[in-house]
Image (cartoon, grey):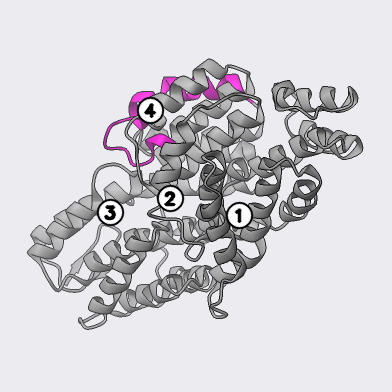
Amino acid sequence: MSSDRQGNTLSGATPAALTLYEQAVEAFNIYRGDPIALVDEAIAQAPDFAMARILKAHLYGLATEPEATAEARDIVADVKTRALNEREASHLDALDLVLQGNWTAAAVALDHHLVRYPRDLVALQSGHLMDFYRANARDMRDRIARALPQWSPEVPGYSIVLGMYAFGLEESGDYARAEEMGRKAVELQPLDCWAHHAVAHVMEMQGRAEDGIGWMIAREPQWSGDDNFFKVHNWWHRALYHLDLGQVDQVFALYDGPIREERSAVALDLVDASALLWRLQLTGHDVGERWDEVATAWDQHADGRLYAFNDWHAVMAYLGAGRESDVSRITDALRNAADPAAETSGWARTTGLALVEGFTAFRRGDYETAVERLHGARYIANRFGGSHAQRDIIDWTLTEAALRGGFRDVATALANERLALKPHSPVNRGFLERARAGGSGGEQAA
């Protein structure tokens, strides 16, 4: 029986199909190239190659897009009719759960899976992404820590494991070790944009904007290629550094250039677009008609049912574009999320709804409601996805609402909180200066 490069046995593989499968796994590992096309070729070579189909189901199931989720369900149903070994059947157990909307149960299933198969690189990466989508920093770190002693530099994929560990360490606040591991990972595999982005997160969280810009520029050829699935997100990180330094012309140039010039309809890229435009407006800048394009792109994904983190970002675009009926559509769907068995319904009714209501109130100038909703939501927002850097938009909007609403004590307290984490941030210093001066009710003074 065939085995992958980490020694895991594979059902139904042929030598030619195995080569294509390994190329697909590597493309998934570094978010570069087209893993779907490669795995389709592998399946064409060997129709009973179970793990090739399972990899495809993971790729679609982790996309957080309705059409992709439906495709993943069809693949899983097909794989269940084929001969599977114990490891492959264990993958399906986790996939079933995530496709039912039970992300935590799926992640726990992969916890148990990886105790038995610690060198299952597809399971490690899929579990890592499940941890990310449910914002579980501890498992992002510890899932990798449990398996890492079973890896070594001689095992193919070792650098990828280090890169995932770097991001888990960063999200857990262990910034020194995160940067060390991330730098080591990209030394071993310069094209590992996940490890690169882990170091970018460290610099963002520490307020090292100048260092971050330097890090991005120095390694740009490695992470910005046309075939890099993660390139927009890394451009977004560079834009955040420029925004923190008040270099708004650079931010607009990045937005109109590499962030949105291709009009990507991938949900991850749309999240970045919404979040960046919202931040630009928070700082008092007119983004023109850019909201209209992003709102239209969101129409194919935003349903208020699949993944509330995406719906919240879609609502930002709908608010910006003045599409009130779509704001109401998503708000109602979140409020009435009906499946009691799905974890994602709970995310919708609690976290997603609170954030959508808070951001809607802010946009409408109801700053008192915005402060009330967002102050509570920020403590539960890590239940349903995103990184600390992505969720910072909640506290940024909350602080701005307190300033514009005249809640001077709240604004001062929030500004002090932000400065304790990033004391050199011009944005945070500006918050405190405005709070001491009595705040501002007008957007142009932001």
Residue at mark 2 to residue at mark 4: CA–CA distance: 28 Å
Instruction: Give, as a single range, the part of the protein colored magenta.
Output: 208-232
User: What's the residue at 79%, 46% (across, down)?
Assistant: 371
Query: Which residue in the structure is indicated by mark 3?
Result: 25
Residue at mark 1 to residue at mark 2: CA–CA distance: 16 Å
Percent from the top left, x then y, of residue 202? 59, 35
The local secondary structure at tag 2 comes to helix
- Image-based side of 349 in relation to 330, left or right: right
- Image-based side of 51 in relation to 414, left or right: left
On screen, 406 above or below 94? above
Percent from the top left, x then y, of residue 287? 53, 27
Q: Amino acid at mark 2?
A: Val
Q: Are marks 1 and 2 in contact (CB under 8 Å)?
A: no
Name the N-terminal-most of marks 3 and 1: 3
The local secondary structure at tag 4 comes to helix
Q: Which of pointers 2 and 4 indicates the residue nearer the eye?
A: 4
Q: Are marks 3 and 2 in contact (CB under 8 Å)?
A: no
Whether residue 223 is in magenta: the answer is yes
Residue at mark 3 to residue at mark 2: CA–CA distance: 13 Å
Query: Which residue in the structure is indicated by mark 4?
Result: 258
User: What's the residue at 39%, 63% (across, down)?
Assistant: 123
Image quarter (top left, top right, bottom left or bottom right) of the C terminus:
top right
Q: Is residue 179 visible?
A: no
Q: Which of pointers 4 and 1 indicates the residue nearer the eye?
A: 4
Q: Which of pointers 3 and 4 indicates the residue nearer the eye?
A: 4
Q: Are marks 3 and 4 in contact (CB under 8 Å)?
A: no
Q: Amino acid at mark 3?
A: Val
Q: State whether the magenta stretch is mostly helix, strand or loop.
A: helix
Query: Which residue in the structure is indicated by mark 1?
Result: 137
Query: Which residue in the structure is indicated by mark 2?
Result: 161
The local secondary structure at tag 3 comes to helix
Name the N-terminal-most of marks 1 and 2: 1
